[in-house]
Amino acid sequence: MRWALVKVCLAVTTMVVIAFAVPLALVIQEMARDRAFSNAERQAAAVAPALSITTEREPLERVVASAGSDARMAVHVPAGDGAAVEIGRARATGEDIATVRRTGRASTADVPGGSTLLQPVALSSGAIAVVEVYVPEAEVGKGVGTAWAVLAGVGAALVVGSVAVADRLGVRMVRPAQRLAEGAHELGEGRLGARVPEDGPTELRLAAVAFNSMADQVVQLLANERELAADLSHRLRTPLTVLRLNAASLGDGPAAEQTRTAVAQLEREVDTIIRTAREAKPQTAAAGPGAGCDAAEVVRERMEFWSALAEDEGRKWRLAGVERPVRIPVARADLAAALDALLGNVFRHTAEGTAFAVDVHNGDDAVIVLVSDAGPGIPDPDAAILRGRGSGNDGSTGLGLDIVRRLAESTGGDVRIGSSVLGGTEVRIWIQLDARSPVRSGHRGAVRRRRPGRSAARLDRTRSLP
């Protein structure tokens, strides 16, 4: 579009310049010719008074010499009472001179090297004398070349100026259109934070406003979908965990075994449904519109739920770091689903009476959530992380770790599995607070981030706990 506007403006301006410059150049040439012949007429008129007084050679030669044009001027006096007088160098033919005498009107005639002006002058005897003034070709075209050069320069400047203006106008129109196209491309690739500056011409500005509104609506719809998936996760997984634990306490017998088998089958089917739903959703940033919650409040709420089951199984538990609000760029439902997944793993994979703890550490640029237990631990944390990506073994779908990993990596953080101070497993969720690009799915979460500052040092010390 930009070059199309430049070409159109170039064509239009060129046509306008030609339309005005060509006639003006011809007018300049004609004016130069008129100026040259006007000067010749004035020179001829200077001789006319002398001719009306005398036709003798000597006085006429002095008059011609005084006019300063003796090299270009000639006087033709016809034979009357005396002999014919010819003064100066004659360039016109006798026929042209005779024609002027017969008609009594001034005329011009072409001669080698230029033109001559033939001016008739009436003598006292009634005869007609002819004053001839030679006008060289250089005199006729004097100043025309310079005037044409100036005219051409002005025309070229107008064309260049119009092209520059058209280019600036084209940029003003094209750049908003390019940004709109780039924003649509980014949005199509799944980068939901893509927005378009609302500037440029009115039409493009309205298009940018509409695009941004559409993108906000898409982000809101996807955020709602994420909340629904996370809500489905903890609504179904949590009751199933309780049901499985209760079924385990039914004792022996065919009915009890059938109940446990049915619960296990139901849990596997629900895991399959939830995994399919989460894999079908797009990978979006957790910090979109509607995201963000108080981590301390969510942790207290979920621990209140799990504490009842912990009392039934005789498990000791501890909660720390939730006395004050801790804001994180994560949706409330996502954090709740991640906590339910980790706490459900504690109840599922450790024996009754095993203690556990949840700690929240708040820093300037990151928040760490630690879920620890006093169970047997995980022999191969790397394999557990891979299982969290969906490999699934030992009767576990790995969905819980997958939920936690997605939560952390959506903020630019990661998940690490290690040994806890209680003697069992510790899962550390690093939640980044600044606007950092999400970690790629191939990242296994074991890269240590070191940041300057007192809070970062404290968090690094927290991560280095055994």
Image (spheres, rainbow, N blue to C red):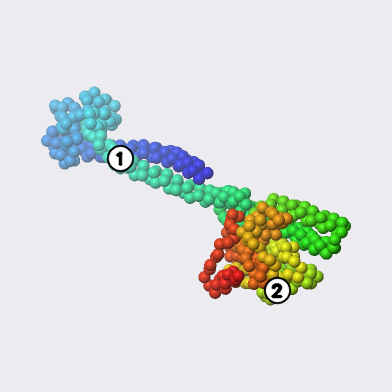
Q: Residues within 10 Å of mark 1 (few under 14, many from 20)?
A: few
Determine the secondary structure under disc 1: helix
Badge 2 amino acid? Leu
Q: What x and y, as percent, mark residue 319?
A: 70, 73
Whether residue 285 is visible, yes or no, is no
Q: What x and y, as percent, mark residue 51?
A: 19, 35
Residue found at the far front of this picture: 252
Tell me the residue at 85%/61% (across/down).
Answer: 252
Q: What x and y, as percent, mark residue 78?
A: 19, 27
Q: Nearer the viewer, residue 243 or 278?
A: 243
Q: Give the quadrant of residue 28.
A: top left
Q: Nearer the viewer, residue 2 or 353?
A: 353
Q: Give the quadrant of residue 23.
A: top left
Q: Which mark is residue 216?
A: none
**Would residue 261 appear left or right of 336 to someone viewing this image?**
right
Residue found at the far bottom of this picture: 323
Is tag 1's residue or tag 2's residue first in the polypeptide sequence?
Answer: 1
Tell me the residue at 22%/25% (across/down).
Answer: 93
Identify the residue under disc 1: 145
Closer to the observer: label 1 or label 2? 2
Tell me the residue at 66%/56% (across/down).
Answer: 387
Q: Give the quadrant of residue 245.
A: bottom right
User: Is mark 1 in CB contact (under 8 Å) with mark 2?
Assistant: no
Whether residue 148 is visible, yes or no, is yes
Q: Residues within 10 Å of mark 2 (few under 14, many from 20)?
A: some
Q: Nearer the viewer, residue 132 or 381?
A: 381
Question: What is the number of callouts on the image?
Answer: 2
Determine the secondary structure under disc 2: strand
Tell me the residue at 67%/72% (across/down).
Answer: 422
* C-alpha separation, residue under disc 1 versus residue under disc 2: 97 Å
Identify the residue under disc 2: 319
